[in-house]
Image: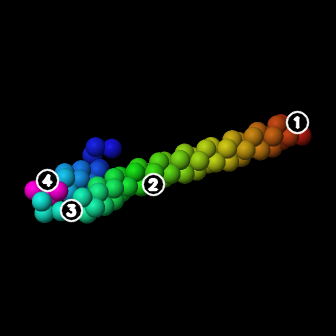
Amino acid sequence: MLKSKTVWTAITAILGAIGGYFTGDLELGEMLQLVVTSGLAVFLKHAVKKSEDAAEAAADAAADAASAAELGAIKKVAAKIKKTG
């Protein structure tokens, strides 16, 4: 997660907002708005990545199940061919 550009951008924005507040360039409300928005960006990015991983795992599981079903059908046909052949 620390390799993400989004995380580092959010950290930079948070530090900049805090620095702006302490230097008097930003008011408390503005600083809090920047901090909360930046934090939400990180959590949203993490949630999207987690959803993508879950969807990929589900697709892989479905593909494995389909392959297993096809293999079972092939074995049944091969067994019937052996009986009649």
Q: For label 1, count other residues whose C-alpha is less than 10 Å away and answer few (under 14), some (14-19) or many (20+).
A: few
Q: Amino acid at mark 4?
A: Phe
Which is nearer the N-term, disc 2 or disc 4? 4
Please name whichever residue, 58 or 77, is drawn nearer the observer in this view of the structure: 58
Foreground disc of the pair 4, 1? 4
Report the residue at 34% width, 52% height from top. 39
Cα separation between marks 4 and 1 = 85 Å
Q: Is residue 8 magenta?
A: no
Residue tagged 2: 48
Please name whichever residue, 79 or 26, is drawn nearer the observer in this view of the structure: 26
Q: Is disc 2 in contact with disc 3, using a CB cutoff of under 8 Å?
A: no
Residue 29 % position (x, y): 28, 61
Q: Is residue 16 visible?
A: no
Q: For label 4, count other residues whose C-alpha is less than 10 Å away and answer few (under 14), some (14-19) or many (20+).
A: few
Cα separation between marks 3 and 4 = 9 Å
Name the element at disc 1: helix
Residue tagged 4: 22
Cα separation between marks 1 and 2 = 53 Å
Residue tagged 1: 83
Name the element at disc 4: helix
Q: Amino acid at mark 3?
A: Glu
Name the element at disc 3: loop
Residue 81 picture quarter? top right
Residue tagged 3: 27
- Is 39 positioned to the left or the right of 63 in the image? left
Q: Amino acid at mark 2?
A: Val
Residue 37 % position (x, y): 33, 59
Please name whichever residue, 62 or 1, is drawn nearer the observer in this view of the structure: 1
Q: For label 2, count other residues whose C-alpha is less than 10 Å away and answer few (under 14), some (14-19) or many (20+).
A: few
Report the residue at 23% width, 53% height from top. 14
